């Protein structure tokens, strides 16, 4: 039997019979098939573009082909917030991609924690037996699955997940050991790709920062200097209306300069990985009211939050997230802007919704990237606000996503975890 025939037989072996049948098949890969699978992975990792996402997509395809899995995905792991973020995959249909959460806590699946603790591939024959709610298994079409840690020198970069799109199957010990080896090999290449990408990104940031400093900072500084000089040299010759106009310019441009400097400081902290989340009991409505008052005169902004709603969250991170989202809505959207907050189980859910033109479809994919700005009439800003909001959200272990509003408008939905006692009424 040649390799092609062996692989075809392996694919058939992995596939489960229908649920009405009594048994599933165990995968027992033979040495020459394992060797061919390893060669396939090595070729996938060594060839093509050396960027993290494209590299991982090739790795997923190679694992799927070598083992006969229908779906293979890779999630990045952020230990500071114990958060998993879907990153690359193979075999997922558009509906499945759309159902994926932007992030989820590692504790949502016990198998991830076990795989992280042991450093080995973890096989789950029945997700319900692994304390995964049936509705979750049905929603994402999860049957038997494998979790493979991506470990490099003891550091977890993420996990690889493999399954048969809801079908149960079995794996023998040698297959699990081989998948663990695959995870280590993928992690080694991924770490190099991350380092390579980081150098490339830093070089790009240098150019972007130079452009920002030469334009975005110069504009408000020049306006402030010009208004101050005019008041100083010709103040006595100006009418009260003209002086009021110059003072308004000073106020507006000083505020714009302050926002730019704040964003640059946030950017520097994010680059240095120096953000630390310190949750504290916070009255949400009061906090939101202060943010709204600092960004607008209140006209056109509607607050919908119970006065006694409280959450255990980091006040500074919350302020930076909501301030950037609300500022973006006021700058690019149209009234009314609705800011709402509510308790959803153990999470705090905050939405900022405006009724402007929304985000063009071609721009949605890069919405949270740094130095990215839409082509709107209000083109001020450095293109940092949404990226910073996303980074603070992830540092807090939460999620932030954009949703279009019908018939037109933009909605940003922020979800921050607060623990089992994180949200409660305060009397």
Image: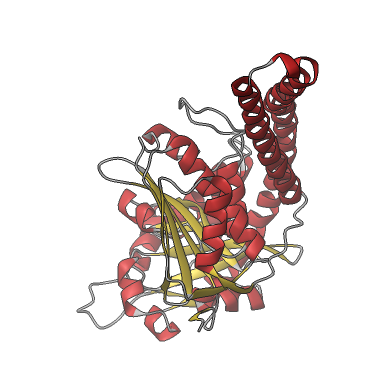
Can residue 146 be seen here? The reply is yes
Residue at position x 59%, y 79% from top? 114
Quarter-of-image position of residue 394 = bottom right
Q: Where is residue 367 in the image (x, y as percent from the top left)?
A: 49, 40
Residue at position x 50%, y 48% from top? 326
In the rendered view, tell whether residue 421 sits above or below residue 49: below
Q: Where is residue 161 in the image (x, y as percent from the top left)?
A: 49, 64
- Asked if residue 23 lies left or right of residue 34, the reply is left
- Asked if residue 296 lies left or right of residue 95, the reply is right
Give the camera-side residue of 338 and 226: 226
- Asked if residue 279 lies left or right of residue 169, the reply is right
In the rendered view, tell whether residue 143 sits above or below residue 46: below
Quarter-of-image position of residue 132 = bottom left
Quadrant of the rendering where the N terminus is positioned: bottom left
Q: Where is residue 397 in the image (x, y as percent from the top left)?
A: 58, 65
- Please, which colouring scheme is shown? secondary structure
């Amino acid at each position: 039997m040649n390799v092609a025939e062996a692989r075809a037989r392996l694919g058939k072996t992995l596939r489960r019979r229908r649920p009405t049948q009594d048994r599933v098949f165990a995968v027992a890969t033979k040495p020459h098939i394992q060797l061919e699978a390893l060669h396939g992975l090595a070729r996938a990792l060594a060839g093509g573009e050396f960027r993290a996402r494209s590299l991982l997509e090739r790795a997923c395809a190679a694992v799927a082909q070598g083992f006969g899995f229908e779906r293979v995905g890779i999630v990045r792991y952020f230990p500071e917030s114990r958060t998993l973020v879907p990153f690359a995959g193979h075999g997922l249909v558009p509906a499945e991609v759309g159902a994926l959460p932007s992030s989820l806590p590692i504790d949502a699946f016990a198998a991830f924690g076990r795989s992280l603790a042991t450093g080995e591939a973890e096989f789950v024959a029945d997700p319900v037996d692994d304390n995964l709610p049936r509705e979750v298994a049905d929603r994402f079409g999860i049957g038997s699955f494998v979790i493979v840690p991506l470990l490099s020198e003891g550091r977890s970069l993420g996990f690889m997940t493999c399954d048969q799109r809801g079908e149960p199957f079995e794996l023998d010990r040698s297959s699990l050991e081989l998948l663990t080896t695959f995870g280590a090999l993928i992690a080694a290449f991924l770490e190099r790709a991350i380092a390579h990408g980081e150098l490339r990104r830093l070089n790009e940031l240098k150019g972007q920062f130079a452009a920002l400093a030469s334009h975005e900072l110069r504009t408000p500084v020049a306006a402030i200097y010009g208004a101050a000089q005019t008041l100083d040299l010709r103040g006595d010759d100006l009418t009260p209306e003209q002086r009021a106009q110059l003072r308004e310019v000073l106020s507006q441009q000083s505020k714009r300069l302050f926002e730019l400097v704040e964003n640059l400081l946030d950017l520097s902290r994010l680059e240095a990985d120096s953000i630390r989340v310190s949750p504290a009991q916070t009255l949400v409505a009061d906090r939101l009211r202060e943010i709204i008052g600092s960004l607008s005169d209140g006209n056109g902004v509607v607050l919908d939050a119970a006065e006694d709603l409280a959450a255990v969250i980091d006040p500074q991170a919350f302020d930076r997230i909501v301030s950037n989202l609300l500022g973006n809505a006021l700058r690019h959207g149209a009234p009314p802007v609705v800011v709402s907050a509510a308790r959803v189980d153990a999470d705090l859910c905050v939405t900022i919704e405006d009724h402007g033109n929304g985000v063009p479809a071609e721009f949605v994919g890069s919405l949270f990237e740094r130095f990215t700005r839409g082509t709107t009439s209000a083109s001020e800003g450095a293109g940092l606000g949404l990226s910073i909001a996303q980074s603070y959200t992830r540092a807090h272990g939460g999620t932030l996503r954009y949703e279009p509003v019908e018939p037109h408008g933009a909605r940003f939905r922020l979800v921050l975890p607060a623990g089992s006692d994180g949200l409660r009424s305060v009397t």
